[in-house]
Amino acid sequence: MQPQQLLRPLKIVFEGEEGVDEGGLKREFFSLLTPELLSPERGLFTYNAAARTYWFSSLSQEDIKKKEKYYWLIGALASMAIYNDMIMPLAFPLVLYNRLQGRSVSLEDLGDVFPEEMNSFEKMLTMDKRDEFEAAFSTQTFSVDIVRDGKVVGEAPLIEGGENIPVTMENRDLFVSKYTQYLLVDSVKQQYDAFERGFLLCSSPLTSQLSGLELQLLICGTPELDFRQLRDSAKVEGFDADDPYIESFWKILSSFDIFQKQKFLKFVTGSDRAPAFGLKEIRMSVQKNGVEPTERLPTAYTCFSVLLLPRYASCEKLQRLLLRAIDESEGFGLQ
């Protein structure tokens, strides 16, 4: 098949099934194909449970040669989804879509791919006591371990001669910048390049004008957050299960728009995305945390998906302080 043939309206026919494709079969095609391409068995992408995103797997040169065509195919399918006005639910981080739009990477992009590394880098950059810094990073140089399948298989210098250059308080900004570049660009260059080549097949001047976030929404659609799953798997402590107050709490959550739901999810779990198999995987715990009189805001332990909820005097106060909590929350762990 010539690439130009992909620039035609897509018609799907399932073997052994009758049906005229008026859009439904195309939607089913992309919804069935996506999880298959992202499955661990294929080894193309690695799922980060903390960030709830997929990222290119670290592969040997031999494996890249074998799988390069599949990265190209996934990029081409994403492009075809746009061309045919279809949704393809690719749980890739925003940085991938930003790169497709020509944006360079930065430290904040690590949060959706390597959240632990980002937290470590932020701590490194904010340490102000030289003795503590040197004690923590005395053996760190401008080189990183190459890890595949949990095993160190080599070493990669971040700059020329990096294995012999120690990290200091004076050059730590450069170290973090180079390490970020390595994680998001250099270490997956061939995988990403193949994906990008496939994606550019059906690109248009209009697509090139979009921001990374707009491109992500165009391909993946608005994220679906089924809070019924969150409720069904939640555990309530300190309240009766049939307490009208808890019923009001769930009604308030159900009334949230998609952006408020994302904020609530990030407030409680540390991520605004649903896990790979739905919100039922979170198993949130709602624990009673005081009674009136109080102006204490709801708080959360994100590591354990625990919401500490005071019992307010009215549903109106509950909604007002819950919204305030999720709007003002910052940081990691105990909010």
Image: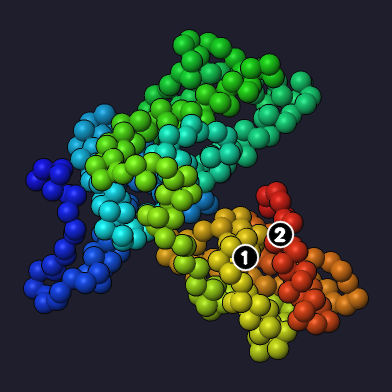
Question: Which residue occupies 42% across, 49% down?
Answer: 215
Question: Which residue occupies 47% across, 44% down?
Answer: 211
- Residue 148's place in the image compared with 240, above or below, is above
Residue 275 appears in the figure: yes
- Nearer to us in this view, 45 or 260: 260
Residue 288 appears in the figure: no
In the rendered image, which quarter contains the C terminus?
bottom right
- Residue 290's place in the image compared with 171, above or below, is below
Residue 22: % across, % down:
21, 72
Q: Mark 1, residues whose alpha carbon is within 10 Å: few (<14), some, or many (≥20)?
A: some
Reading the chain from its start, which is encountered first: label 1 or label 2? 1
- Residue 58's place in the image compared with 216, above or below, is above
Question: Which residue occupies 58% across, 39% down?
Answer: 108
Residue 49: % across, % down:
48, 53
Residue 128: % across, % down:
78, 26
Which residue lies under the disc numbered 1? Answer: 260
- Nearer to us in this view, 235 or 3: 3
- Residue 189's place in the image compared with 248, above or below, is above
Q: Secondary structure at mark 1?
A: helix
| Quarter of the view holding residue 192 | top left
Q: Which mark is residue 327?
A: 2
- Nearer to us in this view, 19 or 121: 19
Q: Mark 2, residues whose alpha carbon is within 10 Å: few (<14), some, or many (≥20)?
A: few
Question: Which residue occupies 66% across, 35% down?
Answer: 122
In the rendered structure, which amino acid carries the disc numbered 1? Gln
How many numbered marks, from 0 up?
A: 2
